[in-house]
Image (cartoon, rainbow, N blue to C red):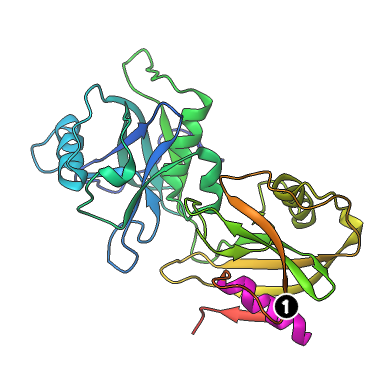
Amino acid sequence: MTVDADDTGSPPRHPVNHPGTAALLVDDAGRYLLHLRDAHKPIWRPGHWTLLGGGTEPGETCDQGIARELREEARLHVPGLVPFATVETLDPAGTLVDEVLVYLGTLNRPAHEIPLYEGIQLRWTHAAETAHMLMDPGTAAVIAAHRAGPRTRRDTNGRVPTVRVREPGTHREGNVVGAHLVLIEDGAVLLGHRHPDSAYAPSTWHVPAGQREPGESTLSCVVREAAEETGLIIDESDLTLVHTVDLLEPGSAVPRVQLFFTASRRRGTPAVLKPDRCTEWRFWPLAALPEPTVDHTRAALDAIARGTAYTAMGWD
């Protein structure tokens, strides 16, 4: 498997002094062990969710490197690790700048029982939840490859598949688009209380929302998220854009455009359809929002009440 839209064979290479290693650890529930890296350090992918692992040292094999990294980072010994895929990272010009051999293994141990000596947090995560997380592109691609074919495969030369990702060019800045539903009735807005173990904004209040998926319009995203999260049926023609939040979150290099829509009509009653993400839905007075409410959602609701169409956050 190669993830590269304009793959034309082996890319040109910058010298890669020591290949990296990573561990794709999966539990019996099909969840992946993800590692949140420090946000404000001069390291690879600061503030991103990645896999445990790191570079090999001089004279060290990849097998030795991944064993050492797991031991140093989390005091883990995972027997039976096998190579699964090689992740190649290309610069905007298509030149190879980094390669990581990803090992596949099984681990069944609560994340809170694993000591962490590097980074911020370890978390068992379902693949669907990664859409709401700031993911390392290589990690996201490897998870997608594993979901497509969970068994290790090798070619006739004994090589594992290559997963190829490309860094965005500095001249074209990528943005994540978030779609939000603002359902107001009698001066109160519908908010959901996020589950304490939610990958995004745990134990906070938030409107029905989600990130736009590939090939999906923002209006379609609002309709889909409303139906999936609350059971409410809304027609795209009944949606109106009422606010935009231009957001740069702390520690992130990826801007987020958060679009808020009201609905003139809806069918159904709000229900908890994803209890692992949201524990309840409740209407709250706009003048008395609960604590804590997601920061950009609170800012948007306050601005909507004032009739303001645009808010910039995090750009100072």
Find residue 12 and report its horizontal and vertical position in percent: 37, 43
Does the rendering let one see residue 4? Answer: no
For mark 1, give the secondary structure.
Answer: loop
> Which is more toward the observer, 96 or 118?
118
Is residue 55 toward the left or the right of residue 142 in the image? left
In the rendered image, the residue lying farthest to the left is 59
Residue at label 1?
286
Where 260 sits versus 142, above or below? below
Q: Which residues are magenta?
A: 295-308
- The amino acid type found where label 1 is placed reads Leu
In the rendered image, the residue lying farthest to the top is 156
Does the rendering let one see residue 120? Answer: yes
Is residue 293 toward the left or the right of residue 162 in the image? right
Find residue 95 and report its horizontal and vertical position in percent: 39, 48
At x 18%, y 32%, the residue is 77
At x 70%, y 73%, the residue is 244
Question: How would you classify the magenta stretch by its main secondary structure?
Answer: helix
Is residue 210 toward the left or the right of residue 156 in the image? right
At x 33%, y 30%, the residue is 108
Residue 151 falls in image quadrant: top left
Find residue 136 and report its horizontal and vertical position in percent: 42, 50
Q: Residue 296: say if magenta.
A: yes
